[in-house]
Amino acid sequence: MQLFGRFKKKEKPGGPLEWLIVGLGNPGRKYLDTRHNAGWHLLDTIVRTHNNFRFDEKRSRALLARANLAGVTVALVKPQTYMNLSGEAVAPIARFYKVPPERILVAFDDVDLPVAVLRLRPKGGAGGHKGMRSIIQQLGTEDFPRLRLGIGRPPGRMPTEAYVLQKFTQAEWAEMLVIYQQGVDAVTAVITEGLDAAMNQFNPRQN
């Protein structure tokens, strides 16, 4: 299940940074394949799909991989603060690179969506997600796009805090690998075609 970007030196892309693609998760091997790290899994899938990205930079308590994605200069960002303090990494990076909130796309696990369902949104509240709450607080706005990655609801009376730190079942992981790859296409569509076009293409149709 492990998805890693290797640390290698590379030529950095020229021109100003246009987008931050933030994936939420927790550092440490015990959290590596847990549901709460779905945002990191998505970024690792981008690295595996586009081999010009490497997580070889550290800034403001985050790992960064900077490169061109479909002709757009982006930075993949993995906060290293642990989930509940994610905003303390994201906000300083956004300020340093002068990236406005509308160009910060945050990918995160969402218990309100079934396993392996993806949904883009232009803005919104934290919905109980402490990592998102931290980013909203530190950016001072809810008006930034997000990519919700469904991990399903906890069974029975299991607390959400315990559920999100569990690993996916083998069958669920196979489904998530498909949605992570679809997520790569969704991210690419957002930065090249615009959020509205990407939402029309990738969001599930409402019955």
Image (cartoon, rainbow, N blue to C red):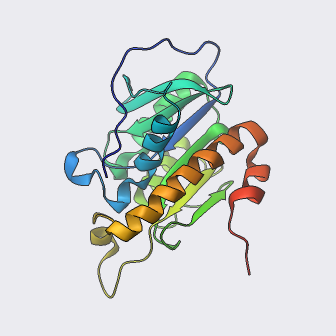
Answer above or below: position of 61 versus 81.
Answer: above
Q: Position of residue 92 (x, y in %)?
A: 47, 30
Residue drawn 29% across and 81% down?
A: 158
Front-most of residues 34 and 20 = 34
Residue at the bottom extreme of this rendering: 156
Answer above or below: position of 92 versus 159.
Answer: above
Residue drawn 31% across and 49% down?
A: 26
Q: Position of residue 22 (x, y in %)?
A: 50, 41
Q: Quadrant of the C terminus?
A: bottom right
Q: Is residue 196 visible?
A: yes
- In the visual, does 154 lie left or right of 126? left
Answer above or below: position of 78 versus 135.
Answer: above
Front-most of residues 16 and 130 = 16
Front-most of residues 189 and 101 = 189
Residue at the left extreme of this rendering: 30
Q: Position of residue 139 (x, y in %)?
A: 54, 42
